[in-house]
Image (cartoon, rainbow, N blue to C red):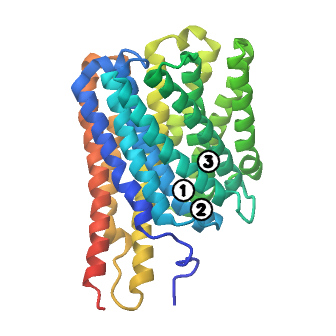
């Protein structure tokens, strides 16, 4: 008999999400290498080319890789819809996204327009395939649950983020005349608040109660948060483009309060866990939500004290909290849940009653997760410190970021090797 509750028929092949998951950690290593090469100048301003290169290694190379790979896995299993031709779709997303992220970082570092042009073509293809395939599947969902609503809003935000990003690439690659500063603010907000936060929320509604054994999220939050945030983003964008700064600031308050509310609710639910045995991925969720809450409160502070918004250190702290703290931590934690589970899941499907299947704890011992968690937390804290005093903390942050990225990559590679070994050693 197959384990209850698992649908082997609906799940895509293991290699579909795995190619994204195995690639992503090495972009953390690349980001650390860039940080070590250019040193404290990275913390001079969020607008410097080298800082923009580092930012896109993290957002495109690390975050987007895992988020899109996870969506290809989640949609069939959680939502009940299948992405057509999953292997081909995954390849047409993964390869252009990887090459495009590398090309864009090179473009920012070199300033050569042809690199921007190449990056735009590659990223346009990868995201075009992703948005088309995932939206076609998502809008066929049989039930519009809170998760489905949040994922639809997140995909809409990704469409806006990509459109703004491609337009900004046209400014650098072809000299298009655009309000670059305003569009950059829009690009960052739609990417971090719309795409990232709403995707994490949609997934959290399912996985936090399931994996962490907590009470469910409040129904009003599940049904209302994503539409409220999406509408607030549209209103804020309209005010910003129209030059109505006071009205835009009020809309920003709604966005920051929404993020803080989601983070605080998740942290509260994690205190209500019914399982008293410690879970090594719990620390990642706590770091992620604490970073999101801190980032939201810092954003609110910049709205109340406008002088703060102009301080380079505050802008960098906000970016580190939202990218490395919030998104990076939850992605680490989810990878450590998803990858060993999928390896075990697919081994059960292929070797059931034919060979002994390694357990998830054998595929990835908890001690490895806990040790990498402490290195990750060290990298986050040192990065925050480097934003305040780069001369002292930049290189320690570099070392910690490189180690945590490599450690994550090696842990995931070991799971894949054990999976392959189990398949090869099974009887025909």
Q: Which mark is residue 201?
A: 3
How busy is the neighbourhood of tag 3: few (under 14 within 10 Å), some, or many (20 plus)? many
The residue drawn where x is 26% and y is 81% is: 424
Residue at position x 48%, y 11% in the image:
311
Q: Which residue is mark 2?
A: 75
Q: Which residue is mark 1?
A: 71
Q: Tag 1: Cα neighbours inside 10 Å, few (<14), some, or many (≥20)?
A: many
Q: Position of residue 407 (x, y in %)?
A: 27, 50
- Residue drawn at point x = 57 percent, y = 63 percent: 83
Q: Quadrant of the C terminus?
A: bottom left
Picture coordinates of residue 289, whole percent (x, y): 53, 41
Q: CA distance from mark 1 to mark 3?
A: 13 Å
- Vertical position of residue 157 compared to residue 112: above or below: below
Q: Tell me, yes or no, whether the two marked residues, 2 and 3, touch with CB atoms within 8 Å.
A: no
Mark 2 or mark 3, earlier in chain: 2
SS category of the residue bearing label 3: helix
Q: Where is residue 290? Give x, y as percent.
A: 51, 38
Asked if the residue at tag 2 contacts the one at tag 1, i.e. Cβ–Cβ closer than 8 Å, the answer is yes
Disc 2 or disc 3, which is closer to the eye?
2
Q: CA distance from mark 2 to mark 3?
A: 15 Å
Whole-number angstrom distance, CA of label 1 to CA of label 2: 6 Å
Q: Specify which label sits upstream in the sequence, 1 or 3.
A: 1
In this view, 71 is above or below 292: below
């Amino acid at each position: 008999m197959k384990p209850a509750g698992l649908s082997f028929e609906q799940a895509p092949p293991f290699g579909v999400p795995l190619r994204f998951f195995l690639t992503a950690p090495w972009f953390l290593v690349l980001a650390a290498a860039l940080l070590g090469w250019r040193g404290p100048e990275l913390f001079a301003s969020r607008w410097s080319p080298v800082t923009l290169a580092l930012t896109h290694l993290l957002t495109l190379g690390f975050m987007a890789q895992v988020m899109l790979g996870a969506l290809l896995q989640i949609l069939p299993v959680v939502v009940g819809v299948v992405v057509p031709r999953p292997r081909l779709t995954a390849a047409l997303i993964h390869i252009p996204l990887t090459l495009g992220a590398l090309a864009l970082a090179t473009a920012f570092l070199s300033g050569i327009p042809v690199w921007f042009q190449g990056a735009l073509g590659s990223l346009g293809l990868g995201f075009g395939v992703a948005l088309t395939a995932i939206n076609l599947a998502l809008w066929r969902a049989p039930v519009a649950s809170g998760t489905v609503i949040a994922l639809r809003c997140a995909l809409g935000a990704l469409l806006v983020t990509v459109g703004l990003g491609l337009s900004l690439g046209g400014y650098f690659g072809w000299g298009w005349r655009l309000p670059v500063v305003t569009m950059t603010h829009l690009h960052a907000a739609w990417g971090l608040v719309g795409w990232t936060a709403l995707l994490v929320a949609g997934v959290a509604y399912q996985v936090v109660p399931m994996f962490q054994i907590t009470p469910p999220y409040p129904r009003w939050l599940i049904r209302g948060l994503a539409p409220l945030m999406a509408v607030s983003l549209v209103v804020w964008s309209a005010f910003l483009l129209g030059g109505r700064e006071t009205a835009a600031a009020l809309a920003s308050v709604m966005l920051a309060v929404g993020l803080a509310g989601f983070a605080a609710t998740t942290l509260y639910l994690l205190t209500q866990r019914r399982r008293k045995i410690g879970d090594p991925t719990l620390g990642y969720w706590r770091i992620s939500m604490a970073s999101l809450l801190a980032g939201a409160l810092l954003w609110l502070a910049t709205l109340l004290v406008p002088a703060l918004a102009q301080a380079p250190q505050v802008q960098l702290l906000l970016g580190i909290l939202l990218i490395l703290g919030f998104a990076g931590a939850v992605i680490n934690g989810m990878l450590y849940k998803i990858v060993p589970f999928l390896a075990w899941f697919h081994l059960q499907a292929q070797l059931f009653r034919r060979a002994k299947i390694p357990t998830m704890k054998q595929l990835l011992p908890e001690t490895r997760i806990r040790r990498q968690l402490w290195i990750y937390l060290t990298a986050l804290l040192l990065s925050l410190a480097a934003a305040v005093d780069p001369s002292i903390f930049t290189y320690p942050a570099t070392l910690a970021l490189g180690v945590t990225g490599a450690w994550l990559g090696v842990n995931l590679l070991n799971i894949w090797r054990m999976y392959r070994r189990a398949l090869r050693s099974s009887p025909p």
